[in-house]
Amino acid sequence: MIPALRYEWRRLFSIRSTWIISVLYLALVGVVGLLPIFVASPAAQSWEGLFSTPGNVLNAMILSVIAAQTFGHEYRYGVIRLTLSEFPAREKILIAKTLILSTYVVAMTLLAWAVLGAGGLIAGSEKVNSEASGFTISESQNSTQMWQVLAFGIGYCIFAMSITMLSRNLALGVTLPLLLATILEPLVGALLGIISDWFEPATKYMPLSSAQAWIVNAPDWPQAGLVFAAWVVGIYFLASFFFIKRDA
C-alpha cells in the first residue's frame, strides 16, 4: 500500500497544473473572503463567516480540477496502463488515489484558512472579530462550521473524481458538478415545480443542491447533509465497481 501511496503522491505533485491550481485556489479564496472586508464591507465580519469562505461552490470547483485529474489525467494521456502494470491490484490504486486526494483537499483548506486568518489579522479587530454578526454563506442564524467546510470540500472532490472514473473524461469531471450546481439542478427543479407542486420536493434530493443547502444550513432543508453524503458514497462505490471490473 505504501508504494501505491508514494506513487500517487509523486504523480500529483509532478504535474505542473497541480501547483497552478493550488495557487489559483488560495488566491480565489483570499479575494472572495478578504476583498469585501478591505473594500466594500460596511460592517465587521465574524471569524466564523470569514472561515466559511472555502465552502463557496466556486472555490470547491477550483479544487475539483485536481480531483478530476486524479483519474482523468491518466486516462487522457494513457498513463493508466502503466499504473495498472505497476499495481495490478486495482483496489490499492483506488484507495491510494482517494486518500491522497482527501489529504490534498484537507491541506489546501488548512492553507486557505491560514490565508484568511492572516488577512483578518491584518484587517484588525474593527473589521474582523468574534462579536460581529458578520456576513456568511449561511442562510440560518447558525454559522457554517469549519468541519462542514472541510467535509463539503472533500465530498465535492470525491464526487468529481467519481464522475471522471465513470466517464473516463477529464473535462466532464470538472464541468458536470459545476453545471449541476449552477444550472442543471435549478433548471430541473424549476421545470418540476411548473409541471406540478407534487414534484417540487424532488429538488431536495438532488446532489449539489443538497450540498449547497447543507453548507449554508438552509433551515427548510434539514436532511440536506445526508442526501449529499448518500450521493457521494453511492456514486463513489458505483465508479469503484466499474473501475475494478472494466478493462483499462
Image: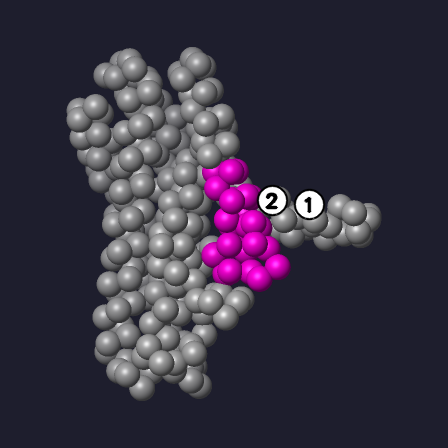
In the image, 155 versus 179, the foreground residue is 155
Residue tagged 2: 206
For residue 212, above or below residue 98: below
In the image, 120 versus 148, the foreground residue is 148
Q: Residue at x 24, y 63 (%)?
A: 114
In the rendered structure, find residue 3 and report the number of the disc placed on it. none
- Which amino acid does the dot numbered 2 rest on? Met
The image quadrant where one finds the C terminus is top left
For residue 50, above or below residue 148: below
Indicate the quadrant where residue 121 lies: bottom left
Q: Residue at x 38, y 45 (%)?
A: 154
Report helix, strand or loop for mark 2.
Answer: loop
- Dot 1: few (<14), some (14–19), or many (≥20) neighbours within 10 Å? few
- Which amino acid does the dot numbered 1 rest on? Ala
Asked whether residue 110 is in view, the answer is yes
- How many marks are shown on the rendered structure? 2
Tell me, yes or no, whether the highlighted magenta stretch contains residue 209: yes
Q: Residue at x 28, y 22 (%)?
A: 92
Magenta span: 206-232
Residue tagged 1: 202
Main secondary structure type of the part rendered in magenta: helix
Q: Residue 2: image x %, image y %?
A: 17, 26
The image quadrant where one finds the N terminus is top left
